[in-house]
Amino acid sequence: MLRLPRAARAALVLTPLLLVAAALATASFAAPPDAPSGAPPASAASSASATSSASAASSASTAPVAPRTLLATDVPDTPAPAPPEDDWKQGVRVQPNRGAPGPCTFTVLNGWIRVECTGRMGATLVAGDPTDVKMRAAGNPFEWDADVLTRVVITSRIQRGKSHIFSLFLLEEGGYGNRTPTDGENLSLTYLEGQSAPLLITSAPR
């Protein structure tokens, strides 16, 4: 039986251990560094960024459009019939050239304007041709919350060379809880010769 010196026997024992240690060291240097604790994976961060961008774009596309003033292009050269009630949803919101809108909203569609005022019990045409003008009121003006329940809707064709003036009515608080009708806002719609576009003016109650 061949007997090796003690130093040789120690080398044979240590050599496999050194090989294992070297392999572990090589693997540790080759492996990529771990992501910091709490940091999302790159794919998750990219997905979150895309979702955020899509959400922002969607919000921007659904943001309400601010009302504008009336334009000459709102009145077609060929008169159109009065829009059906459901078609007004496709109209464009407009605002007065002068004065505040108050309790009213204004919508224009195919040469027609629709005025809807909440908390008003009635309206009348003070000046102008009544042709193609319609007014209707809804709600009970003598209910305790009539300012919410009542409304007036006016539809009128916008006509070149003509003007219309409307007066609204509201309820004024009196003694002993009584409420009496009184003058409200005045609405003026004109499109006279020399005007570049229709002009809408409102005035507050006196």
Image: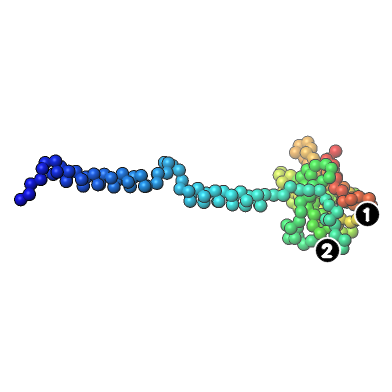
Task: From the image, tell me which residue sits under label 1.
Answer: 161
Q: What element carries label 1?
A: loop
Q: Is residue 141 visible?
A: no
Residue 147: percent from left, percent from top: 74, 44
Against 99, residue 111 (above or below) is below
Tag 2: amino acid: Pro
Residue 21: percent from left, percent from top: 26, 44
Q: Residue 24 carries which label?
A: none
Colour convention of the picture: rainbow
Sequence order check, earlier mark of 1 and 2: 2
Task: From the image, tell me which residue sits under label 2.
Answer: 81
Q: Is residue 45 visible?
A: yes
Position of 206 compared to 146: left or right?
Answer: right
Q: In percent of the image, x 67 and y 49: which residue is there?
A: 63
Tag 1: amino acid: Gly
Q: Quadrant of the C terminus?
A: top right
Residue 35: percent from left, percent from top: 42, 44
Q: Is mark 2 on a helix, strand or loop?
A: loop
